Image (tube, grey):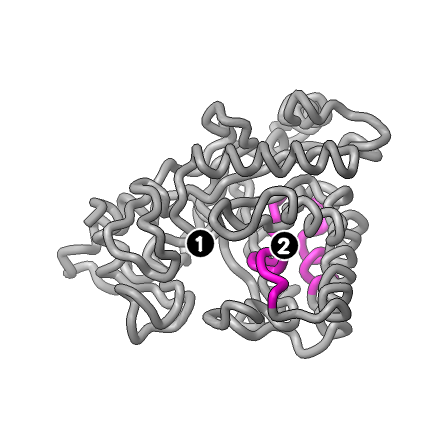
Amino acid sequence: MRRLLRTLAASAFACLLLPLSAAPSSATTTSVQASPIGMTSGFYTDPSSGPAAWAAANPGDGRAAGIRDNIASRPMARWFGAWSGDIGAAVGSYVGAADAADKLPVLIAYNIPGRDACGGHSGGGAGTPAAYQAWISAFASAIGSRPALVVIEPDSLGDFSCLSQAQIAERNGMLRGALAQFRDRAPNTWTYLDAGNPAWIGAATMAQHLDGAGARDAHGFSLNISNYLTTGENTAYGNAINSALSSSYGYTKPYVVDTSRNGNGSNGQWCNPGGRRIGAVSQTVGGGGGAEMLLWLKTPGESDGNCGVGGGSAAGQFLPEVAYKMIYGY
């Protein structure tokens, strides 16, 4: 009954979440989609996240209680890639657990060929575009009609400096294809293309990248994933992107900000800088700056790669000392 009552009001709720500048029109949307937020009772907290697993395995460690109470108990995204094995089974199990709890899961698809091609710290991805198409199709099918939020391929639009025009076109085709898979196979999922962060490329250029990747067919875009810039810096950037989308392409989109590690802002470094702090917890209120939601998309304490205070680690590896210091900002 709770799901039914929420679903009856979902379309109206979806309209309320749109920015004022994004009122429905033929230029901004083709249909009003049911709101996965309205279909659920809050965000899902992953009981098997890296911080949760570490705290459970190390109950006698003096850092365990702090990590458990301040990080592991918070809703955050789960990332899916080649390490996930059978992607249909992995996604289906995760979304199914969230659905059984009447909670909204946040998932990140991270398997595009040539992933992080220019940065190099998180390289990998599916071997071919055809393999990626099969992978992302299985991902979307595993969600089905259950509610979810999905961020599609962080980093994929932030840096084209090492790509040829043919490679850019190929990447855009894969991203447009991914959006189509979720549209057709996961009707109660909101999809977000990743738009990097304010310190990466200009808003007008990012708007061009988003439109080329099919942003018209996404619910919105994401900002600050795995970065440390303040929420205010990101909302200013998101609003500038929307201004560029509106003036150049005739539409705007909602956006979300990753606040998992931006409590102290940035010191100008992006790869495991010291002195950072966890930020505002996941919430459907965007903080008044224009964001649709604030979300923990990167897990605090997970390494950005073999760099900074995470020297000797691999991207995605959970580092308890880094996590513990991030709780207190030192």
Specify the label residue 131 is tagged with: none
Residue range of the region highlighted in magenta in the rendering: 136-161
Q: Quadrant of the N terminus?
A: top right
Q: Amino acid at mark 1?
A: Ser
Image depth: mark 2 or mark 1 in front: 1
**Residue 54 in the image, given as x and y percentages of width and height:** 29, 62
**Residue 168 in the image, given as x and y percentages of width and height:** 72, 65
> Relative to 184, is 10 above or below?
above
Residue shown at the point (62%, 72%) measured from the top left: 114
Kindly identify which residue carries mark 2.
152
Kindly identify which residue carries mark 1.
226
Q: Residues within 10 Å of mark 1 (few under 14, many from 20)?
A: many
The verdict on residue 277 being magenta is: no
Residue shown at the point (55%, 41%) measured from the top left: 104
Asked which secondary structure carries label 2, the reply is strand
Q: Amino acid at mark 2?
A: Ile
> Relative to 48, is 113 above or below?
below
